[in-house]
Image: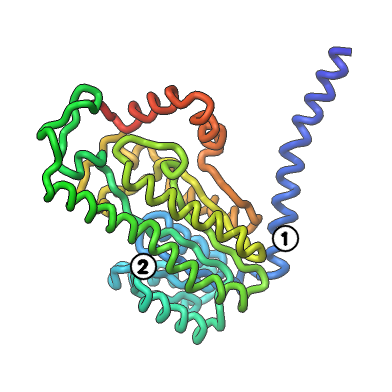
Amino acid sequence: MATGISRQGLAILAIIPVFVTLRRLWLRSRRVLKVAKIDERVLILGASSGIGRSIAHLYAERGARVCVVGRRREKVEEVAEECRARSSAYGYGATRVMGVAGDFADVDDMVRLRTTLETEWQGVDTVIVAAGVSALQPLMAVAGLEAHSKGSKFVPPKATKTGIQRAVDVSVAATRGNYVGPLVAAITFIPLLSATSASPSILLVSSLAALIPAPTRTIYASTKAASLLLYQALSIEHPKINFTFFIPSTVEGDFRASAVDQGPVREADPNKHGLKREDVAQRCIEAVDTYEKTVFMPRLMRPGHLLYWIWPSFVEWRARIKYNFTV
């Protein structure tokens, strides 16, 4: 009997990955039937660097119409040219790529971008929200305080007015980049998506720090968490739009370049130990194609998120090690 049960269990385990693969293929075929890859109109906010840039490259290679958006005009045009070259190399032509300079937290810029999409493409099918900023210092350090004795004593003993104001200014900048931007994008493009696409989809690139607290990421994590919850609520309010919440751990790249607090990177070099941008980008596109809701990368971080509520002291200890944090 034990052997029989064991064999049944093994058979079930063997079937699971087959079932998952078939389900993904079925879901992917559903979207392709509604929006062919070469007809897909993809807007990428935050495409001038990092994950957004890699996503733009991959969409261009498969023949989609791609609009790359970023604040720096020269970087936007550089990425647009890269996408045009890739689109042409795969036989689709360079005219399928647009580059638009704009700040996704600026209402005027986003309204202008929406008008461009309506004029050039008569709408949009997929919106990728990959823009954002980082913040790398403990909150008290942003205010000019150095913590000692496990955070119970400070040098100087209290924050100055200037220090408090600096912390406020940094948090305002982080909120603008990580919450206001996604909010403006949602309000601007959700109606356009709904009205013009047979299969409207939005992917938000969030962060594992939005779900699992991390030292030195106080401001960054809280603002990323705010935008994640915003989009999760929006997915309930707009059930006909396919929302995907992409939650990666550390990704390779110059994370400090976008830091609004000018803080040092304390963790191990992300370019050596972080997820590869191309792998993250490929997984993002796969998630949109298959209507996945919440995607953790790597996958083992999904139970890691739950572990925080079961054994918080262990997760906090591991976070202190990862971010090389001591007080």
Residue 256 sits above or below residue 17 on the image? below
Say whether residue 313 is left or right of residue 231: left
Disc number lying in front (2 or 1): 2
Which quadrant would the C terminus be assigned to in this image? top left
Residue type, mark 2 in image: Ala
Q: Rate crowding at label 1 as few (under 14), some (14 to 19) or many (20 or more) other CA atoms within 10 Å.
A: some
Residue drawn at x 70%, y 70% as measured from the top left? 34
Question: Label for residue 29?
Answer: 1
Residue 36 sits above or below residue 245 on the image? below
Residue 297 sits above or below residue 181 on the image? above
Q: Position of residue 128 (x, y in %)?
A: 49, 62
Q: Position of residue 200 (x, y in %)?
A: 61, 68
The secondary element bearing badge 2 is classed as: loop
Say whether residue 207 is left or right of residue 103: right
Question: Label for residue 105?
Answer: 2
Q: Position of residue 276 (x, y in %)?
A: 43, 45
- Dot 2 and dot 1 residues touching (CB under 8 Å): no
Which residue is at the front of the view, 169 or 261? 169
Residue type, mark 1 in image: Ser
Q: Position of residue 219 (x, y in %)?
A: 32, 46
Q: Earlier in the sequence, mark 2 or mark 1?
A: 1
Say whether residue 139 is left or right of residue 97: left
